Image: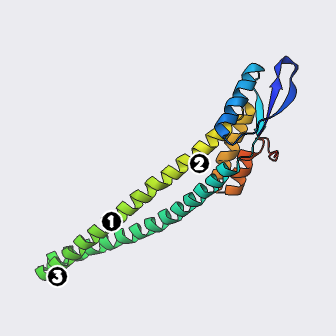
């Protein structure tokens, strides 16, 4: 809720406190204030508990979708190995002229194919949900970045990307609430 900006040509810091429940509104105020002061550089410390709780919940969902993605990928790899084995067995049965065995292998292959299609549908649905949650995280980062300008904005985005890559929800929240230079959030 505190917006820090450079005031005109004198390059002095001006501290302004904005109290509201909307990060978008605070960003508009910060942007308008910077425009009025002809400042291209300003940082901010912000505290929006509801937004950060939503973000933490979204990050938990991202972690869960990633765990599920890894499990489903392993199951899919196992299914692929079983398909290969059945194809080899079916080809052996064909070469030996054992048509009843060939029929059993192809029936098993058909059932396995249907299983793999269902697994693919699960993976696809999980992937879509994961991408939706990651878009939500990106929107939260964009909103927090709009509170800042210049190098402060660039530092925030870089630090936020690093926190997301490290899969550290507390670090990401601290970055979004605090000053991009690593300063703790003013409350």
Name the residue beneath numbered marker 3. 101
What kind of element bears circle 3? helix
Q: CA distance from mark 3 to mark 2?
A: 53 Å
From the image, state whether disc 3 or disc 2 is nearer to you: 2
Residue at the top extreme of this rendering: 9
Does residue 110 lie above or below 186 as drawn? below
Q: Quadrant of residue 74?
A: bottom left
57 left or right of 100? right
Verify CB contact (< 8 Å) between mark 1 and mark 3: no
Q: Is residue 33 above or below residue 55?
A: above
Q: Quadrant of residue 95?
A: bottom left
Other-residue count near label 2 (Cα within 10 Å), few / some / many at <14 / 14–19 / ≥20: many
For the residue labelled by badge 2, is the local secondary structure a helix, a strand or a loop?
helix
Dot label at residue 137: 2
Residue 151 in the image: x percent, y percent? 74, 32
Q: CA distance from mark 1 to mark 2?
A: 29 Å
């Amino acid at each position: 809720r505190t917006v820090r900006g450079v005031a005109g040509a004198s390059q002095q810091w001006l501290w302004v406190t904005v109290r509201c429940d909307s990060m978008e509104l605070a960003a508009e105020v910060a942007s308008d204030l910077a425009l009025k002061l002809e400042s291209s550089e300003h940082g901010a410390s912000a505290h929006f508990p509801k937004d950060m709780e939503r973000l933490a919940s979204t990050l938990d969902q991202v972690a869960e979708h990633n765990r599920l993605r890894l499990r489903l990928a392993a199951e899919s790899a196992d299914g692929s190995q079983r398909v290969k084995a059945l194809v080899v067995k079916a080809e052996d049965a064909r070469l030996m002229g054992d048509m009843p065995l060939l029929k059993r292998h192809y029936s098993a292959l058909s059932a396995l194919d249907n299983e793999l299609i269902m697994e693919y549908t699960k993976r696809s649905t999980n992937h879509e949900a994961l991408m939706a949650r990651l878009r939500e995280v990106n929107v939260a980062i964009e909103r927090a970045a709009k509170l800042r300008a210049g190098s402060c904005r660039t530092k925030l985005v870089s630090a936020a990307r690093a926190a997301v890559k490290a899969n550290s929800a507390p670090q990401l929240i601290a970055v979004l609430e605090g000053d991009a230079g690593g300063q703790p959030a003013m409350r």
